[in-house]
Image: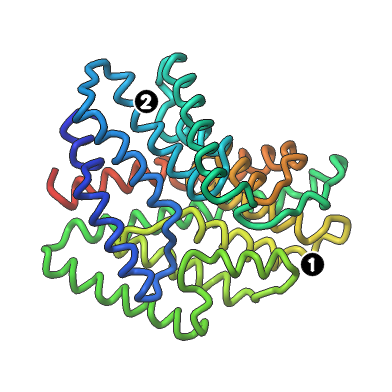
Amino acid sequence: RNKSIREQLLSFRIALGKIGFIFLGMLGGAPIGIEGPSIHIGGSIFYGFNRFIKLNRKFLIHALIAIGGSAGLIVAFNAPIAGFLFAYEEIGRKLKKQALILIAIMSGIVYLFAIMYRGDANYLTNLSAYSLELTLVWQLLPLAILAGVLGGLFSKSTLFLINKFITHSKLKVITIAVVLGFIVASFNYLSTGQIAGSGKEEVLLMLGGTGLGLDFVAMKYFATLTSLASTIPGGLFMPSISIGAGIGSEVASFYTQIDAQVIIIMAMIAYLSAVIRAPLTSVFVILEMTTTLHLLIPGLMIAFIANWISKQIFAQPIYEALADNYLKLTGK
């Protein structure tokens, strides 16, 4: 992207405004989280440093943005490997080797400061006691397909609704946003508040063996879609993880040879990968959250399958599409 677009998307004004709207949305019961926006805010802060240090080399400027995004994810989820991989998958695929090394070093430093400040506790819970025999991995294929389809439809539906926004006048956009907000509020009321917020507490309940029902999954899915379509700035990571956990919790009873907790972990990986289209990040952020890095092989398999299926339904990665539509909406 060119400099003017970077200035638009990564300005301190946008970052501060996003923080304010996130808290307003959360107070209003929207199914959003602060975790995902911390990535954008981190990128904005580090990009802002360039105003003072005046880097001229393009790859170093991109590295600063990637470091900020990585730092945001690490601070949010206590997941250093996922932080680096997110910077690579979403921001830095074309960066030079020197920049990637710099990102890796800075990710490590950020993680050290994070654990010094709040410890190295899991973001979710320690599930290292659960394992999966590799001979049973093939049984996860239907789950990967289901998550891939649902994730692809989520992205396609969200961008379809946002594109409808762009064709209207500002007054109509506000009216539609109010209507969508009312729909989210209705889901919140019907779920007695369970779909509000990021969904972290609900994920912990499901990992602990408490099923929340198919109605929770459906309402969280459509409420998150509606919130995103109404252009409320909010995190997509944790809401997607909670939807994935709900999917896993509902299908776990069909898997008699695999622990329900493992199915939920795999479903979280698959659905997150299908939505954000960053399979490596999806695998490591979930495995680091739950101390289950020994499930790496099945996690990689299910993430890449779900990602591929989602791509057949909606080709453009959702973060890229959201950025494009934001620029259209603001007339940039």
192 is higher (above) or lower (below) than 3: below
Q: Position of residue 165 (x, y in %)?
A: 22, 61
Q: Earlier in the sequence, mark 2 or mark 1?
A: 2
Left or right: 313 in relation to 259 = left
The residue labelled by disc 1 is 253
**Element at badge 1?**
helix
- Taking depth in this image into account, of 222 and 262 the one nearest to the observer is 262
Q: Residue at x 33, y 62 (%)?
A: 22
Q: Amino acid at mark 1?
A: Ser
- Taking depth in this image into account, of 261 and 79 the one nearest to the observer is 79
> Which image quarter is the N terminus in?
top left
Q: Is residue 53 visible?
A: yes
Residue 65 occupies quadrant: top left
Left or right: 83 in relation to 291 = left
Q: Position of residue 274 (x, y in %)?
A: 54, 48
Residue 63, numbered circle: 2
Q: Is residue 308 visible?
A: no
Left or right: 301 in relation to 254 = left
Q: Position of residue 58 (x, y in %)?
A: 27, 19
Q: Residue at x 19, y 41 (%)?
A: 8
**Element at badge 2?**
helix
291 is higher (above) or lower (below) than 110: below
Left or right: 48 in relation to 130 = left
Q: Position of residue 254 (x, y in %)?
A: 80, 64
**Is disc 2 surrounded by few (<14), some (14 to 19) or many (20+) residues within 10 Å?**
many
Q: Amino acid at mark 2?
A: Ala
Marks 2 and 1 sit apart, C-alpha to C-alpha, by 45 Å
